[in-house]
Image (cartoon, grey):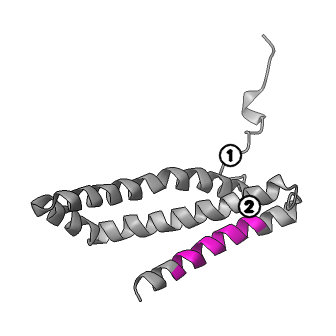
Amino acid sequence: MADVNRGNRPLSPHLTVYKLPITAITSILTRITGHAMLAGIILLVWWLVSAAEGGVEFARADRVMHSWFGFIVMWASVWSLWYHFCAGIRHLIYDARLGLELREADKLAWAIVIASGVLTLLTLILFYL
């Protein structure tokens, strides 16, 4: 066996050293938001099915929907939907072989983060007017 001095060898980069680029973060968020929308869909379907049944079950579902938990889940789902939509547009731009340069890709990544936030706020404003 080779005599290797293991104490003086550098460690491989770790997340504390390596900073993920914004394009990687938005790619990961696209996958997370795709799955996160399921929580809102389940809550909405439960509310709709209980509305069809009526009675005590609807009162319970309606109470959950109008609670802080229901509010957070539904608006997180709205943000997830807008984010996923904007990320899909970004991928259509990539499919057209546009925006593939590093600076352009970074700008597109920030654009989907900002656009999803703005669209969620607009939805919130329109919903409550």
For the residue pair 85 and 29, the one nearer the viewer reads as: 85
Quarter placement of the C terminus: bottom left
Position in image of residue 102 (x %, y %): 86, 60
Q: Quick one: label 1, few (<14), some, or many (20+) residues within 10 Å?
A: few
Q: Is residue 3 above or below residue 96?
A: above
Mark 2 or 1: in front is 2
Residue with the mark numbered 1: 14
- N-term-proximal mark, 2 vs 1: 1
Q: Which residues are magenta?
A: 108-122
Q: Residues within 10 Å of mark 2 (few under 14, many from 20)?
A: some
Q: What label sits on residue 90 in the rendered view?
A: 2
Decide if residue 21 is in sight here: no
Q: Based on the displayed image, in which of its 4 quarters is residue 2 positioned? A: top right
Residue 121 counted in the magenta span: yes
Residue furthest out toward the left: 56
Q: Which residue corresponds to the image point at 53% horizontal and 82% vertical from the top-left?
A: 122
129 in the magenta segment: no
* Residue occupying image coordinates x 81% and y 62%: 105
- Amino acid on which disc 1 is placed: His
Q: Which mark is residue 112?
A: none
Quadrant of the rendered image containing residue 117: bottom right
